[in-house]
Amino acid sequence: MMTKEEILQSLAIQTDSKLILVVIDGIGGLPVRGKTELEAAKTPNLDRLAPQSICGLIDPISYGITPGSGPSHLALFGYDPFRYEIGRGVMEALGIGLKLTEEDLTARGNFATVDENGIIVDRRAGRIPTERNREICRFLQKEVREVNGVEVSVHPGKEHRVVLLFRGKGLRDDLTDADPQKDGQKAKGTEGLHPEAQRTADVVNEYLRRATETLKSFHPANTILLRGFSKIPDIPSMSERFKLKPAAIATYPMYRGLARLVGMDILETGETLREEVETLKNHFDQYDFFYIHFKKTDSSGEDGDFKKKVKAIEEIDRVLPSILRLKPDVLVVTGDHSTPAVLKSHSWHPNPILLHSRYLRPDRIRRFTERQCQKGQLGRFPAVDIVALMLANGLKLKKFGA
């Protein structure tokens, strides 16, 4: 019996229709004084588009499960996140352009602040500037290059983020996170989930010890927290699975890395939303699937800044007309997960979704918000089904069966 994935792959056909997936990171929220961030934002363009579209709510993974950005994006790209488990380290490493071998071990890191007792005061080291991050990485790389016969390299990301690459024989990725992921707790090392992984855990922990010693004078970036230990997986490309020629427009390394892993071309772009949209315009004739990622909403939610997240949503709304002027055959606007400012973290709540094409029966809902979208005809469904809906509305799927 064929699986759902195999059936979808057998039905996919190449056409000239253009599909755009706009991912507003962490878009979903929870009410503060009666309104979510989306409900509080002034979004005339999204609200004008919603009544001409079909809407609903998506669960990134499944009911009640709070997703990381990796699995939630995999689902958006049409991959079952339970089947294809991809570590954060690999995504970050690929996102900054590192060339990985099958033996390499990667980890996503944060420069962080600890006090004299090793208690984490700030997991993000005050979101140090990216240039300062580069300076610290250069210094750290000179001081700690090798641990117990394993080469170690540290690579800067944006702000406080770094990527660690461990290169040596027999390294394992079945390790616990060396990051409690909350301020006020003691920094910790990693542990092997199986006896065979203990040597790798010892290498990582020795590196963390030396790095923390080296970083004493670099306050607030005086330690490193590591998570997402991972090695490169085997995963089919979107071209293989869906007969698409896909491209990604994203500024943050992790999202670029994940897009590269599923076979998207990574388009170079500037840092602003308008520059991302300009990149879309400049390459619109060259691809038939575009993934555009907007980050500010998630960062604001994690900072617990309700007003800042509202402003980020309004900024995105202002660039929507430029996307619509390209006249894509299918446009989807949604999020990878919810990041309510009131929780200061990702959450399990479903995300609103809007799908616009010429082949639909519009919902006529009033606004693009969580509570309005729950009235839409799409209902509540798994994010992994979005690509199939996009392909169908782009007339990129043959009929199934006789």
Image: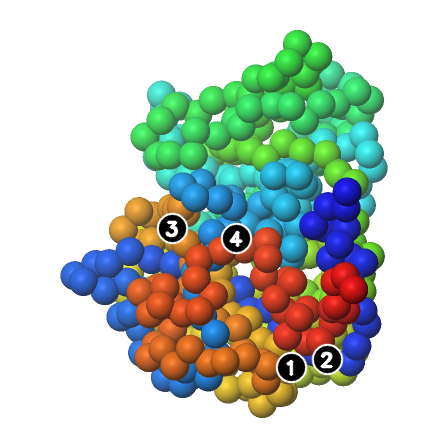
How busy is the neighbourhood of tag 4: few (under 14 within 10 Å), some, or many (20 plus)?
some
Q: CA distance from mark 3 to mark 2?
A: 32 Å
How busy is the neighbourhood of tag 1: few (under 14 within 10 Å), some, or many (20 plus)?
many
- Find residue 359 and report its horizontal and vertical position in percent: 59, 81
Q: CA distance from mark 4 to mark 2?
A: 24 Å
Residue of label 3: 349
Q: Is residue 277 above or below residue 126?
A: below
Residue at x 32%, y 30% (from the top left corner): 184
From where the camera sits, is residue 401 visible?
Answer: yes
- Tell me which numbered mark, 2 or 1, is placed earlier along the sequence: 2
Residue of label 2: 17
Residue of label 1: 329
Residue at x 83%, y 37% (from the top left corner): 101
- Residue 382 is labelled as 4
Q: Amino acid at mark 2?
A: Ser
Q: Are marks 2 and 1 in contact (CB under 8 Å)?
A: yes
- Tell me which numbered mark, 3 or 4, is placed earlier along the sequence: 3
Q: CA distance from mark 1 to mark 3?
A: 29 Å
Residue 395 occupies quadrant: bottom right
